[in-house]
Image: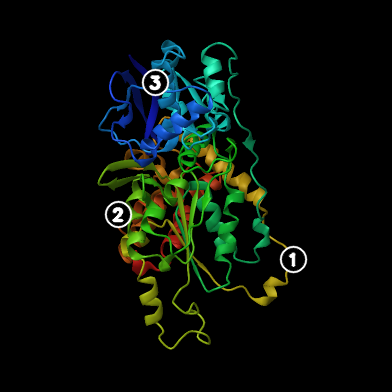
Protein backbone atom coordinates (compact mmCIF):
# COMPACT_ATOMS: atom_id res chain seq x y z
CA UNK A 1 0.00 0.00 0.00
CA UNK A 2 1.20 3.51 -0.83
CA UNK A 3 0.06 6.36 1.43
CA UNK A 4 0.64 10.04 0.85
CA UNK A 5 1.28 12.98 3.14
CA UNK A 6 2.20 16.54 2.27
CA UNK A 7 4.81 19.04 3.40
CA UNK A 8 7.02 21.79 1.94
CA UNK A 9 10.65 22.45 1.02
CA UNK A 10 11.99 25.97 1.29
CA UNK A 11 13.55 27.93 -1.56
CA UNK A 12 14.21 31.30 0.00
CA UNK A 13 10.90 32.64 1.29
CA UNK A 14 9.03 30.37 -1.13
CA UNK A 15 7.65 27.11 0.24
CA UNK A 16 7.56 24.49 -2.52
CA UNK A 17 4.98 21.68 -2.04
CA UNK A 18 6.41 18.20 -1.45
CA UNK A 19 4.46 14.93 -1.60
CA UNK A 20 5.65 12.29 0.87
CA UNK A 21 4.93 8.87 -0.64
CA UNK A 22 5.26 5.97 1.78
CA UNK A 23 5.20 2.34 0.61
CA UNK A 24 5.24 -0.75 2.84
CA UNK A 25 6.01 -3.77 0.62
CA UNK A 26 7.17 -7.37 1.10
CA UNK A 27 10.93 -7.88 1.13
CA UNK A 28 13.93 -7.72 3.38
CA UNK A 29 13.31 -5.39 6.34
CA UNK A 30 14.64 -1.92 5.48
CA UNK A 31 13.72 1.74 5.89
CA UNK A 32 14.99 4.03 3.12
CA UNK A 33 14.28 7.64 2.23
CA UNK A 34 14.80 8.78 -1.37
CA UNK A 35 14.19 12.04 -3.21
CA UNK A 36 17.38 14.04 -2.72
CA UNK A 37 17.33 14.25 1.10
CA UNK A 38 20.13 15.90 3.05
CA UNK A 39 21.71 14.38 6.14
CA UNK A 40 19.03 15.69 8.53
CA UNK A 41 16.24 14.23 6.37
CA UNK A 42 18.03 10.88 6.02
CA UNK A 43 18.33 10.65 9.79
CA UNK A 44 14.55 11.06 10.09
CA UNK A 45 14.09 7.31 9.76
CA UNK A 46 15.78 6.72 13.13
CA UNK A 47 13.83 9.47 14.86
CA UNK A 48 10.54 8.26 13.38
CA UNK A 49 11.24 4.61 14.25
CA UNK A 50 12.12 5.44 17.87
CA UNK A 51 9.21 7.86 18.30
CA UNK A 52 6.75 5.22 17.09
CA UNK A 53 8.37 2.66 19.37
CA UNK A 54 7.80 4.99 22.34
CA UNK A 55 4.07 4.81 21.45
CA UNK A 56 4.23 0.99 21.36
CA UNK A 57 3.90 0.98 17.57
CA UNK A 58 6.30 -1.53 16.04
CA UNK A 59 7.20 -1.31 12.38
CA UNK A 60 6.45 -4.46 10.36
CA UNK A 61 9.27 -6.68 9.10
CA UNK A 62 8.86 -5.39 5.57
CA UNK A 63 10.56 -2.99 3.21
CA UNK A 64 9.58 0.63 3.90
CA UNK A 65 10.35 3.17 1.17
CA UNK A 66 9.67 6.89 1.55
CA UNK A 67 9.88 9.01 -1.61
CA UNK A 68 9.94 12.81 -1.38
CA UNK A 69 8.47 14.11 -4.62
CA UNK A 70 9.53 15.97 -6.72
CA UNK A 71 12.68 13.89 -6.48
CA UNK A 72 14.98 16.51 -8.09
CA UNK A 73 14.17 19.20 -5.49
CA UNK A 74 16.71 19.30 -2.63
CA UNK A 75 15.14 18.47 0.74
CA UNK A 76 16.80 20.07 3.74
CA UNK A 77 15.88 20.33 7.41
CA UNK A 78 14.40 18.30 10.22
CA UNK A 79 10.80 19.40 9.57
CA UNK A 80 10.26 16.33 7.32
CA UNK A 81 10.01 14.07 10.41
CA UNK A 82 6.30 14.66 11.03
CA UNK A 83 5.07 14.22 7.43
CA UNK A 84 7.14 11.03 7.09
CA UNK A 85 5.59 9.72 10.31
CA UNK A 86 2.09 10.63 9.06
CA UNK A 87 2.65 8.86 5.75
CA UNK A 88 3.92 5.78 7.56
CA UNK A 89 0.99 5.77 10.00
CA UNK A 90 -1.43 6.08 7.08
CA UNK A 91 0.33 3.24 5.22
CA UNK A 92 -0.03 1.06 8.33
CA UNK A 93 -3.74 2.06 8.47
CA UNK A 94 -3.39 3.47 11.97
CA UNK A 95 -4.79 6.83 10.85
CA UNK A 96 -7.10 7.39 7.85
CA UNK A 97 -5.29 8.41 4.67
CA UNK A 98 -8.07 10.73 3.49
CA UNK A 99 -7.66 12.85 6.64
CA UNK A 100 -3.92 13.20 6.01
CA UNK A 101 -4.56 14.27 2.41
CA UNK A 102 -5.97 17.63 3.53
CA UNK A 103 -2.99 18.49 5.71
CA UNK A 104 0.41 20.10 5.14
CA UNK A 105 2.64 18.94 7.98
CA UNK A 106 6.02 19.98 9.29
CA UNK A 107 7.78 19.30 12.57
CA UNK A 108 10.79 17.59 14.11
CA UNK A 109 10.32 14.49 16.26
CA UNK A 110 12.15 13.85 19.49
CA UNK A 111 12.90 10.25 20.47
CA UNK A 112 10.02 10.17 22.99
CA UNK A 113 7.49 11.29 20.38
CA UNK A 114 7.45 14.97 21.25
CA UNK A 115 7.21 17.59 18.51
CA UNK A 116 10.04 20.11 18.40
CA UNK A 117 9.43 23.57 16.86
CA UNK A 118 11.03 24.24 13.48
CA UNK A 119 11.76 27.28 11.35
CA UNK A 120 9.56 28.32 8.44
CA UNK A 121 6.10 27.75 9.91
CA UNK A 122 4.83 31.08 8.56
CA UNK A 123 5.75 30.55 4.88
CA UNK A 124 4.57 26.94 5.21
CA UNK A 125 1.15 28.20 6.33
CA UNK A 126 1.05 30.51 3.29
CA UNK A 127 1.77 27.54 1.02
CA UNK A 128 -0.90 25.45 2.77
CA UNK A 129 -3.45 28.21 2.22
CA UNK A 130 -2.62 28.34 -1.49
CA UNK A 131 -3.17 24.55 -1.74
CA UNK A 132 -6.43 24.82 0.24
CA UNK A 133 -5.06 22.60 3.01
CA UNK A 134 -4.72 22.96 6.76
CA UNK A 135 -1.33 23.10 8.48
CA UNK A 136 -0.21 20.67 11.17
CA UNK A 137 2.86 21.77 13.13
CA UNK A 138 4.40 21.61 16.62
CA UNK A 139 2.42 23.50 19.23
CA UNK A 140 5.23 26.00 19.78
CA UNK A 141 5.18 26.90 16.05
CA UNK A 142 1.38 27.28 15.95
CA UNK A 143 1.11 30.93 17.09
CA UNK A 144 3.51 31.97 14.35
CA UNK A 145 1.73 30.07 11.57
CA UNK A 146 -1.74 31.15 12.76
CA UNK A 147 -1.05 34.68 11.53
CA UNK A 148 -2.03 33.38 8.11
CA UNK A 149 -5.77 33.58 8.61
CA UNK A 150 -6.59 31.95 5.26
CA UNK A 151 -6.01 28.43 6.57
CA UNK A 152 -6.57 26.40 9.71
CA UNK A 153 -3.47 25.79 11.81
CA UNK A 154 -3.33 22.83 14.21
CA UNK A 155 -0.59 22.69 16.82
CA UNK A 156 0.29 19.41 18.52
CA UNK A 157 2.66 18.73 21.42
CA UNK A 158 3.34 15.06 20.65
CA UNK A 159 2.90 12.51 17.91
CA UNK A 160 0.42 10.70 20.14
CA UNK A 161 -1.76 13.85 20.13
CA UNK A 162 -1.66 13.77 16.33
CA UNK A 163 -2.83 10.13 16.25
CA UNK A 164 -5.67 10.84 18.68
CA UNK A 165 -6.67 13.86 16.57
CA UNK A 166 -6.89 11.92 13.30
CA UNK A 167 -8.65 8.97 14.88
CA UNK A 168 -11.27 11.25 16.43
CA UNK A 169 -10.42 10.37 20.02
CA UNK A 170 -9.31 13.88 21.02
CA UNK A 171 -9.47 16.57 18.30
CA UNK A 172 -6.92 19.34 18.61
CA UNK A 173 -8.14 22.96 18.76
CA UNK A 174 -6.94 25.44 16.14
CA UNK A 175 -3.90 27.49 17.10
CA UNK A 176 -4.28 31.17 17.96
CA UNK A 177 -2.01 33.88 16.52
CA UNK A 178 0.83 35.04 18.75
CA UNK A 179 0.93 38.46 20.31
CA UNK A 180 1.82 41.61 18.46
CA UNK A 181 4.96 42.72 20.25
CA UNK A 182 4.86 46.35 21.29
CA UNK A 183 7.32 48.63 19.57
CA UNK A 184 10.08 49.08 22.16
CA UNK A 185 10.64 52.51 23.59
CA UNK A 186 13.87 53.64 22.00
CA UNK A 187 16.29 56.40 22.72
CA UNK A 188 15.17 59.94 21.99
CA UNK A 189 16.56 62.09 19.20
CA UNK A 190 16.59 64.97 21.65
CA UNK A 191 19.47 63.26 23.47
CA UNK A 192 21.79 64.30 20.63
CA UNK A 193 23.31 67.71 21.29
CA UNK A 194 23.84 69.88 18.24
CA UNK A 195 24.11 68.13 14.84
CA UNK A 196 20.97 69.83 13.54
CA UNK A 197 21.94 69.26 9.92
CA UNK A 198 22.52 65.55 10.53
CA UNK A 199 19.17 65.31 12.33
CA UNK A 200 17.47 66.93 9.35
CA UNK A 201 19.15 64.44 6.99
CA UNK A 202 17.98 61.61 9.25
CA UNK A 203 14.40 62.89 9.06
CA UNK A 204 14.51 63.14 5.26
CA UNK A 205 15.99 59.67 4.98
CA UNK A 206 13.27 58.21 7.22
CA UNK A 207 10.47 59.99 5.35
CA UNK A 208 11.48 58.78 1.89
CA UNK A 209 13.54 55.68 2.73
CA UNK A 210 16.66 57.23 1.28
CA UNK A 211 20.17 55.85 1.75
CA UNK A 212 22.32 57.97 4.04
CA UNK A 213 26.08 58.30 4.54
CA UNK A 214 27.42 60.11 7.61
CA UNK A 215 31.10 61.12 7.67
CA UNK A 216 32.67 62.54 10.80
CA UNK A 217 35.47 62.34 13.32
CA UNK A 218 35.39 59.67 16.06
CA UNK A 219 32.92 60.53 18.80
CA UNK A 220 31.00 63.11 16.79
CA UNK A 221 27.71 61.21 17.21
CA UNK A 222 27.26 59.14 14.02
CA UNK A 223 26.38 55.90 15.80
CA UNK A 224 24.28 57.82 18.32
CA UNK A 225 22.22 59.33 15.52
CA UNK A 226 21.78 55.99 13.75
CA UNK A 227 20.66 54.29 16.98
CA UNK A 228 17.81 56.78 17.22
CA UNK A 229 16.61 56.26 13.65
CA UNK A 230 14.15 53.48 14.64
CA UNK A 231 12.38 55.93 16.97
CA UNK A 232 11.29 58.15 14.07
CA UNK A 233 10.31 55.43 11.60
CA UNK A 234 6.60 54.54 11.18
CA UNK A 235 5.42 51.12 12.27
CA UNK A 236 5.20 48.32 9.73
CA UNK A 237 1.88 47.93 7.96
CA UNK A 238 0.11 44.57 8.25
CA UNK A 239 1.39 43.47 4.81
CA UNK A 240 4.93 44.63 5.56
CA UNK A 241 4.91 42.90 8.96
CA UNK A 242 3.85 39.63 7.35
CA UNK A 243 6.47 39.65 4.57
CA UNK A 244 9.21 40.71 6.99
CA UNK A 245 8.18 38.00 9.45
CA UNK A 246 8.38 35.35 6.73
CA UNK A 247 12.08 36.07 6.31
CA UNK A 248 12.64 36.14 10.06
CA UNK A 249 10.73 32.86 10.37
CA UNK A 250 13.19 31.17 8.00
CA UNK A 251 16.04 32.60 10.08
CA UNK A 252 14.46 31.42 13.35
CA UNK A 253 14.20 34.96 14.73
CA UNK A 254 10.51 35.15 15.60
CA UNK A 255 10.03 35.37 19.36
CA UNK A 256 7.40 32.90 20.65
CA UNK A 257 5.37 33.16 17.48
CA UNK A 258 4.72 36.87 17.92
CA UNK A 259 4.97 39.45 15.18
CA UNK A 260 6.45 42.89 15.75
CA UNK A 261 5.35 46.08 14.06
CA UNK A 262 8.78 47.63 14.69
CA UNK A 263 10.93 47.97 11.61
CA UNK A 264 14.04 45.77 11.57
CA UNK A 265 17.31 47.47 12.53
CA UNK A 266 20.32 45.35 11.65
CA UNK A 267 23.88 46.45 12.46
CA UNK A 268 26.44 43.85 11.33
CA UNK A 269 30.06 44.15 12.39
CA UNK A 270 32.59 45.16 9.75
CA UNK A 271 34.23 41.72 9.96
CA UNK A 272 31.05 40.04 8.65
CA UNK A 273 31.51 37.80 5.62
CA UNK A 274 29.77 38.15 2.28
CA UNK A 275 27.48 35.20 3.08
CA UNK A 276 26.48 36.89 6.36
CA UNK A 277 25.66 40.19 4.64
CA UNK A 278 24.18 39.07 1.31
CA UNK A 279 23.03 35.55 2.20
CA UNK A 280 24.34 32.08 1.50
CA UNK A 281 26.12 29.40 3.44
CA UNK A 282 24.49 26.05 4.05
CA UNK A 283 21.01 26.13 2.58
CA UNK A 284 21.49 29.64 1.13
CA UNK A 285 20.06 31.33 4.21
CA UNK A 286 19.00 35.01 4.18
CA UNK A 287 21.70 37.56 4.95
CA UNK A 288 21.62 40.84 6.81
CA UNK A 289 20.29 42.78 3.82
CA UNK A 290 17.23 40.50 3.69
CA UNK A 291 16.78 40.49 7.47
CA UNK A 292 16.68 44.30 7.18
CA UNK A 293 13.86 44.13 4.59
CA UNK A 294 11.40 47.00 5.20
CA UNK A 295 13.80 48.35 7.81
CA UNK A 296 17.31 49.72 8.29
CA UNK A 297 20.74 48.26 7.61
CA UNK A 298 23.29 50.25 9.62
CA UNK A 299 26.90 49.66 8.62
CA UNK A 300 29.27 51.39 11.01
CA UNK A 301 32.91 51.84 10.01
CA UNK A 302 31.73 51.49 6.41
CA UNK A 303 35.14 51.59 4.66
CA UNK A 304 36.40 48.84 6.98
CA UNK A 305 34.08 46.26 5.39
CA UNK A 306 35.80 44.05 2.79
CA UNK A 307 35.72 45.63 -0.66
CA UNK A 308 33.95 42.62 -2.19
CA UNK A 309 31.20 42.81 0.46
CA UNK A 310 30.60 46.50 -0.24
CA UNK A 311 30.43 45.99 -3.99
CA UNK A 312 27.81 43.25 -3.64
CA UNK A 313 25.45 45.85 -2.15
CA UNK A 314 25.19 47.77 -5.41
CA UNK A 315 22.66 45.56 -7.20
CA UNK A 316 20.38 44.84 -4.19
CA UNK A 317 20.18 48.58 -3.47
CA UNK A 318 18.84 49.17 -6.99
CA UNK A 319 16.55 46.15 -7.42
CA UNK A 320 15.28 45.53 -3.88
CA UNK A 321 16.01 41.80 -4.12
CA UNK A 322 19.04 39.54 -4.12
CA UNK A 323 19.66 36.25 -5.90
CA UNK A 324 21.86 33.90 -3.86
CA UNK A 325 23.35 31.58 -6.47
CA UNK A 326 25.02 28.36 -5.39
CA UNK A 327 25.92 25.17 -7.23
CA UNK A 328 22.82 23.37 -5.97
CA UNK A 329 20.50 26.29 -5.28
CA UNK A 330 19.38 29.62 -6.73
CA UNK A 331 17.39 31.43 -4.07
CA UNK A 332 15.82 34.88 -4.32
CA UNK A 333 15.20 37.02 -1.22
CA UNK A 334 13.56 40.45 -0.96
CA UNK A 335 15.82 43.16 0.48
CA UNK A 336 14.18 46.56 0.20
CA UNK A 337 16.09 48.24 3.01
CA UNK A 338 17.38 51.68 3.93
CA UNK A 339 21.18 51.72 4.06
CA UNK A 340 22.67 53.99 6.70
CA UNK A 341 26.47 54.05 6.71
CA UNK A 342 28.91 55.81 9.01
CA UNK A 343 32.57 56.45 8.30
CA UNK A 344 35.53 58.36 9.63
CA UNK A 345 37.02 60.84 7.14
CA UNK A 346 40.37 59.01 7.18
CA UNK A 347 42.24 56.17 8.84
CA UNK A 348 43.28 58.22 11.87
CA UNK A 349 39.86 59.86 11.97
CA UNK A 350 40.89 63.48 12.42
CA UNK A 351 41.39 64.75 8.88
CA UNK A 352 39.40 68.03 9.42
CA UNK A 353 41.44 68.89 12.55
CA UNK A 354 44.94 70.14 11.58
CA UNK A 355 46.11 69.82 15.19
CA UNK A 356 45.26 66.12 15.44
CA UNK A 357 45.46 64.78 11.87
CA UNK A 358 48.36 62.57 10.88
CA UNK A 359 51.23 63.74 8.70
CA UNK A 360 49.82 61.99 5.62
CA UNK A 361 47.12 64.58 4.95
CA UNK A 362 45.41 64.54 2.46
CA UNK A 363 46.57 61.14 1.20
CA UNK A 364 45.28 59.47 4.37
CA UNK A 365 41.69 60.57 3.67
CA UNK A 366 41.82 59.90 -0.07
CA UNK A 367 43.07 56.36 0.43
CA UNK A 368 40.59 55.61 3.21
CA UNK A 369 37.44 56.96 1.56
CA UNK A 370 38.71 55.52 -1.73
CA UNK A 371 37.73 52.12 -0.38
CA UNK A 372 34.17 53.14 -1.21
CA UNK A 373 33.91 52.92 -4.98
CA UNK A 374 32.36 55.68 -7.05
CA UNK A 375 29.38 53.56 -8.20
CA UNK A 376 28.57 52.64 -4.58
CA UNK A 377 28.98 56.23 -3.39
CA UNK A 378 26.64 57.28 -6.19
CA UNK A 379 23.86 55.23 -4.60
CA UNK A 380 23.73 57.30 -1.42
CA UNK A 381 20.91 59.83 -1.71
CA UNK A 382 22.12 61.85 1.28
CA UNK A 383 25.67 62.53 2.41
CA UNK A 384 26.16 64.58 5.52
CA UNK A 385 29.19 65.78 7.43
CA UNK A 386 28.98 65.17 11.19
CA UNK A 387 31.49 67.57 12.78
CA UNK A 388 32.67 67.20 16.37
CA UNK A 389 30.46 68.79 19.03
CA UNK A 390 32.04 71.45 21.21
CA UNK A 391 32.17 70.96 24.95
CA UNK A 392 30.03 74.07 25.36
CA UNK A 393 27.25 72.41 23.34
CA UNK A 394 27.46 69.28 25.47
CA UNK A 395 26.61 71.31 28.58
CA UNK A 396 23.52 72.83 26.98
CA UNK A 397 20.09 71.51 28.09
CA UNK A 398 18.09 69.24 25.84
CA UNK A 399 16.87 71.03 22.75
CA UNK A 400 15.39 70.47 19.35
CA UNK A 401 12.48 68.25 18.40
CA UNK A 402 11.88 64.98 20.20
CA UNK A 403 11.67 61.65 18.40
CA UNK A 404 7.88 61.72 18.77
CA UNK A 405 7.63 65.09 17.02
CA UNK A 406 9.90 64.05 14.18
CA UNK A 407 8.12 60.70 13.88
CA UNK A 408 4.79 62.52 13.45
CA UNK A 409 6.17 64.51 10.52
CA UNK A 410 7.68 61.37 8.99
CA UNK A 411 4.40 59.48 9.34
CA UNK A 412 2.50 62.32 7.66
CA UNK A 413 4.95 62.36 4.75
CA UNK A 414 4.76 58.57 4.42
CA UNK A 415 0.94 58.74 4.38
CA UNK A 416 1.08 61.26 1.54
CA UNK A 417 3.38 58.96 -0.43
CA UNK A 418 1.22 55.89 0.20
CA UNK A 419 -1.83 57.69 -1.17
CA UNK A 420 0.12 59.06 -4.14
CA UNK A 421 1.54 55.70 -5.21
CA UNK A 422 -1.42 53.51 -4.29
CA UNK A 423 -2.04 52.61 -7.93
CA UNK A 424 1.62 51.84 -8.71
CA UNK A 425 3.08 48.38 -8.26
CA UNK A 426 6.22 47.99 -6.12
CA UNK A 427 6.18 51.70 -5.29
CA UNK A 428 5.59 52.72 -1.69
CA UNK A 429 7.87 55.67 -0.97
CA UNK A 430 9.72 58.33 -2.91
CA UNK A 431 12.90 56.24 -3.09
CA UNK A 432 11.00 53.74 -5.28
CA UNK A 433 9.69 56.05 -7.99
CA UNK A 434 11.26 55.84 -11.43
CA UNK A 435 10.48 56.29 -15.10
CA UNK A 436 7.18 57.96 -15.90
CA UNK A 437 6.19 58.10 -12.23
CA UNK A 438 9.32 60.15 -11.49
CA UNK A 439 8.46 62.55 -14.31
CA UNK A 440 4.86 62.82 -13.16
CA UNK A 441 5.40 63.33 -9.42
CA UNK A 442 8.88 64.88 -9.15
CA UNK A 443 8.95 67.53 -11.86
CA UNK A 444 10.50 70.77 -10.53
CA UNK A 445 9.36 74.27 -11.47
CA UNK A 446 11.34 76.37 -13.95
CA UNK A 447 13.72 77.86 -11.37
CA UNK A 448 14.27 74.49 -9.72
CA UNK A 449 15.02 72.80 -13.02
CA UNK A 450 17.49 75.51 -13.99
CA UNK A 451 19.31 75.12 -10.67
CA UNK A 452 19.43 71.34 -11.02
CA UNK A 453 20.76 71.50 -14.59
CA UNK A 454 23.45 74.00 -13.58
CA UNK A 455 24.55 71.82 -10.66
CA UNK A 456 24.50 68.67 -12.79
CA UNK A 457 26.79 70.23 -15.39
CA UNK A 458 29.14 71.90 -12.91
CA UNK A 459 29.59 68.94 -10.59
CA UNK A 460 29.22 66.17 -13.14
CA UNK A 461 26.18 64.46 -11.66
CA UNK A 462 25.49 61.05 -13.14
CA UNK A 463 22.02 60.23 -14.48
CA UNK A 464 21.46 58.19 -11.32
CA UNK A 465 22.55 61.12 -9.17
CA UNK A 466 20.26 63.47 -11.08
CA UNK A 467 17.24 61.27 -10.44
CA UNK A 468 18.14 60.72 -6.79
CA UNK A 469 18.23 64.47 -6.24
CA UNK A 470 14.69 64.66 -7.61
CA UNK A 471 13.52 61.89 -5.26
CA UNK A 472 15.07 63.57 -2.23
CA UNK A 473 13.58 66.90 -3.25
CA UNK A 474 10.18 65.24 -3.52
CA UNK A 475 10.56 63.98 0.06
CA UNK A 476 11.61 67.43 1.29
CA UNK A 477 8.50 68.88 -0.35
CA UNK A 478 6.32 66.23 1.28
CA UNK A 479 7.77 67.03 4.70
CA UNK A 480 6.94 70.67 4.09
CA UNK A 481 3.41 69.88 2.88
CA UNK A 482 4.10 71.25 -0.61
CA UNK A 483 2.46 69.81 -3.71
CA UNK A 484 4.90 71.35 -6.18
CA UNK A 485 8.65 70.85 -6.40
CA UNK A 486 10.31 74.25 -6.13
CA UNK A 487 13.80 75.71 -6.15
CA UNK A 488 14.31 75.58 -2.31
CA UNK A 489 13.54 71.85 -2.33
CA UNK A 490 16.06 71.23 -5.12
CA UNK A 491 18.65 73.41 -3.39
CA UNK A 492 18.40 71.50 -0.10
CA UNK A 493 18.53 68.14 -1.89
CA UNK A 494 21.64 69.25 -3.78
CA UNK A 495 23.30 70.40 -0.57
CA UNK A 496 23.20 66.83 0.72
CA UNK A 497 24.19 65.35 -2.62
CA UNK A 498 27.23 67.48 -3.30
CA UNK A 499 29.15 66.65 -0.10
CA UNK A 500 32.27 65.06 -1.50
CA UNK A 501 31.21 66.00 -5.03
CA UNK A 502 34.38 64.50 -6.48
CA UNK A 503 32.90 61.06 -5.76
CA UNK A 504 29.64 61.73 -7.58
Between discs 3 and 2, the one toward the N terminus:
3
Q: Nearer the viewer, mark 2 or mark 1?
A: 1
Classify mark 3: helix, strand or loop: loop
Label 2, residues with CA under 10 Å away: few <14, some 14-19, many ≥20: few
Which residue is denoted by mark 3 in the rendering?
A: 60
- Tell whether 427 sits left or right of 328: right
Question: Residue pushed farthest right?
Answer: 397
Residue at 64%, 63% in the rendered image: 192
Which residue is denoted by mark 1 in the rendering?
A: 397
Which residue is denoted by mark 2 in the rendering?
A: 463
Q: CA distance from mark 2 to mark 1?
A: 44 Å
Quadrant of residue 221 within the rendered picture: bottom right
Q: Position of residue 1 (x, y in %)?
A: 33, 14
Above or below, 477 against 125 in this view is: below
- Image quarter hosting the C terminus: bottom left
Residues 15 and 501: in front is 15
Q: CA distance from mark 1 to mark 3?
A: 79 Å
Amino acid sequence: MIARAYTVAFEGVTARPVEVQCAVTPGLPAFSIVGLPDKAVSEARDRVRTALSSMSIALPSKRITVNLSPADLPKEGSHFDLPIALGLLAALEIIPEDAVAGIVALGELSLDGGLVPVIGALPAAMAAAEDDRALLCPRASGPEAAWVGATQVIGAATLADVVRHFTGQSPLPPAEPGEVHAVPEGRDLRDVRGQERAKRALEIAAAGRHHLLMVGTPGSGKSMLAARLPTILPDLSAAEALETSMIHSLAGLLDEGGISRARPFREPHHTASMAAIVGGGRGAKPGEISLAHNGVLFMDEFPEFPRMVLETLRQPIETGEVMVARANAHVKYPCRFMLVAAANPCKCGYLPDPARACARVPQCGEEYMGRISGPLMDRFDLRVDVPPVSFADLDLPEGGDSSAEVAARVATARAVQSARYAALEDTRVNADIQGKALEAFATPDTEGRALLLTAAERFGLSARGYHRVLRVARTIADLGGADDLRRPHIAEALSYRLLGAKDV
